[in-house]
Amino acid sequence: MLRSAFILILCVLLNACQKPSPQQEREQHLAAARGDLVVAVTWPLGGGKSSLLKGVQLAAEQINAAGGVIDGRKLRLLVKDDGGTLAHGRMAAQEIANQADVVATIGHLNTFIAIPAARIYERAGILFISPGSSGEKLTEGGGGLTFRTLQSNSDQGRQICAYARRQGLKSIAVYYIKNEYGTDLANHFEQQCREMNVQIADRRSYRMGGDNYASVMHDWASLLHFDAIFLAGSLPESAQIVREARQAGIQVPIFGAAGLDSVQLIELGGRDVEGVVVFSQFSHQTQRQEVSSFVTAYRARFDTLPDSSAAQGYDTLMLLTLAMRDAHSGVPGRIAEALRKVRDYKGVTGTFSISPTGDVIGKPMTPLVVREGRFELLAQPSGIEQAHNEPASAPPAP
């Protein structure tokens, strides 16, 4: 009896040890699947950058209309609103992770949501690719399934400070939102400026939804000498910050990072934001074939011009589809291997490659200026570093 009990316990232990992990279970399930390839999209769908979903939808429609991704398998989107909050973001990520058919997730605008969500996707064996999170920690020490199509904060800080230096700006005041994104971007911008001999005159932070902007701007106007203000901020707060700066009598140039490239800045800021420069991913005025084709298709589908968020959504799904085709697989690990091999991909947001860590590299930012109530492409040369030579590599569009 003792021997039988020992054998029974041993069998139970062996079975427990051999139980596949969630990643292995998903891999086995997706390797055997022959139906639609399910891609989740999670984003704050009520904010100023909600057009990302339209860009993803347009890409999916074009891919499916041309016969699908691989072996006739088509894309199916699973859409979740992350609400722009940590609680809703985690909930959306867990709901996606509970779906056995999900191959990949596109989403999360905010770095403070994307980082914990990435851990949920990694544990579930889902490939995660963010078009909105620029925080360095997103791809640091990941499990190999986390990517982004937006420049990291270190890359953004380098490009934006290079612009400031080439514009002859020698002393800059930095105002940043006190969260994972803003603090990280401000740190990298300051570091890059130090290396480029551009002085940081002062550095202040604000909390989301805060209301002390006026006092900071009055302090700067009366006590500080500087050539420009850099906003490592968010919307809607940044529109009010610019208004307070102008009302305090500050007339120096103001420029902001990718967090401000939304028409919401203009709608909320009105005439006060005239002349503000933002560093974006996209302009419909860019003279490239990929851009003009995308703009034509987007206008025909949605009866409006695409913005940066729509272009980011479109590019991200097209890039993901390219990796699926190169891997000839719907298994996340194999798609991730193919993504890390992408070189000089020509998308509507520019030409870029993917690093071994999952970061986008070689992608120039697009400078836009608010002029007469709309964004216009800032004339080159603008001080923005150009990407290396753009080879004639074919985009993944069907």
Image (cartoon, helix red, strand yellow):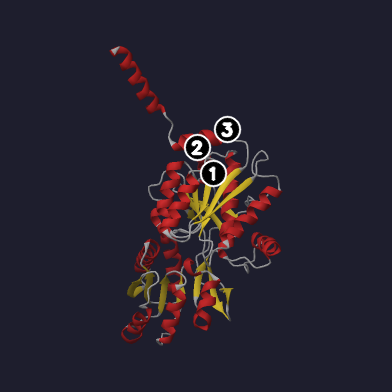
In this view, the residue farthest toward the front is 1
- Which tag, 1 or 3, sits closer to the chain's start? 3
Of the residues shown, which amino acid type is indicated by label 1? Val
Reading the image, the residue beneath label 2 is 26
Q: Is residue 99 above or below residue 13?
A: below
Camera-nearest residue between 121 and 372:
121
Reading the image, the residue beneath label 1 is 102
Reading the image, the residue beneath label 3 is 32
Circles 1 and 3: CB atoms closer than 8 Å:
no
What SS does tag 2 mark? Answer: helix
Camera-nearest residue between 229 and 193:
229
How many marks the image carries: the answer is 3
Of the residues shown, which amino acid type is indicated by label 3? Ala
Kindly tell me whether residue 274 is visible in this rendering.
Answer: no
Circles 2 and 1: CB atoms closer than 8 Å:
no
Q: Which mark is residue 303?
A: none
Residue at the spot 64% in from the left edge and 66% down from the top edge: 287
- Rendering coords of residue 326 (x, y %): 59, 42
Residue at the spot 46% in from the left edge and 38% down from the top edge: 23
- Which tag, 2 or 3, sits closer to the chain's start? 2
Q: CA distance from mark 2 to mark 1?
A: 9 Å
- Rendering coords of residue 171 (x, y %): 37, 77
What SS does tag 1 mark? Answer: strand
Q: CA distance from mark 2 to mark 3?
A: 10 Å
**Left of 269 or right of it: where is 217?**
left
Residue at the spot 37% in from the left edge and 20% down from the top edge: 11
- Rendering coords of residue 383 (x, y %): 49, 70
Of the residues shown, which amino acid type is indicated by label 2? Arg
